[in-house]
Amino acid sequence: MRNINLAGGRALEAHERVALLTVPAGLRPFCLLTHIEEADVYLASAVLPTLGLHCGQCNVSFDYDLVVDAPPDVIAAYKAYEAKHPLQGLGVATKRIEFGSAPLGIALGYPKCCSDMDESTKSHDRSSALRVLIEDKKGDFAAVREALANGELPQVATDRKEAWDRRFDHTRDLFPFALHTACDDCIGRGAVSPTGRLRDRKSVV
Ligand SMILES: [Zn+2]
């Protein structure tokens, strides 16, 4: 892939280069490139299949368990908001995969402990964001539904998000080859943790 300058530089940031290489190296069946420039998606889509890889545009929507005191129609409006704002990227896989409702972290081959930490952080943060929106609208649920329909959901800084950011920095220091954010257990146990063992495999790449 270096020869066509896809994983070699211009089109992908360093982290995504490693992410992509893990797939043909057989370390995991799938990766999702979310920082690839739109102009390069065409190049990638043309070249990767010639190397025996499947690739295509992926839209990942999230379905978090919310802890919010709101009527079902507000929760439904929130879910519609999430569905309209998927995480988009170029998925690359060694074969066709049906993901169904598997969490993205598991589909990407991340350790379950870390994927669970990520999901629970995001559920907490989304719940906080929806609660803040409800407060902003002074409990007027019709106004909350309208705001969600218009794509409004406040960005909220939470302790959990800050803890996630700290883990992200620790992960980069401790596990340079990890492609996810490690959970506290992995950070505490280092090389013998599920994330540490991934590092050993990825360093082969
Ligand atoms: Zn972990």
Image (cartoon, rainbow, N blue to C red):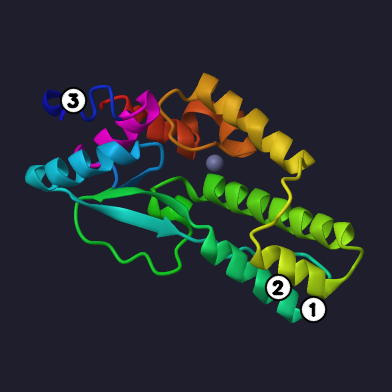
Q: Which residues are magenta?
A: 12-26
Q: Secondary structure at mark 1?
A: loop
Residue on which the image places disc 3: 5
Where residue 147 sits in the image (x, y, percent)? 73, 63
Quadrant in which residue 151 is drawn: bottom right
Residue on which the image places disc 2: 75
Separation of disc 1 and disc 2 at Cα? 7 Å
Task: Using a 10 Å C-alpha cutoff, classify the residue at mark 3 as few (fewer than 14 neighbours), some (14 to 19) or many (20 or more).
Answer: few
Disc nearer the start of the sequence (1/3)? 3
Task: Using a 10 Å C-alpha cutoff, classify the residue at mark 2 as few (fewer than 14 neighbours), some (14 to 19) or many (20 or more).
Answer: some
Separation of disc 1 and disc 3 at Cα? 52 Å
Q: Secondary structure at mark 2?
A: helix
Quadrant in which residue 62 is drawn: bottom right
Q: Which quarter is ligand 1 in?
A: top right
Task: Using a 10 Å C-alpha cutoff, classify the residue at mark 1 as few (fewer than 14 neighbours), some (14 to 19) or many (20 or more).
Answer: few
Q: Is residue 201 visible?
A: no
Q: Is residue 69 left or right of residue 196?
A: right
Amino acid on which disc 2 is placed: Ile
Nearer the observer, 182 or 160: 160
88, above or below 26, in the image: below
Residue on which the image places disc 1: 71
**1 inside magenta stretch:** no
The residue drawn where x is 59% and y is 70% is 80
Where residue 120 sits in the image (x, y, percent)? 65, 53
167, above or below 58, in the image: above
Where residue 130 sits in the image (x, y, percent)? 76, 60
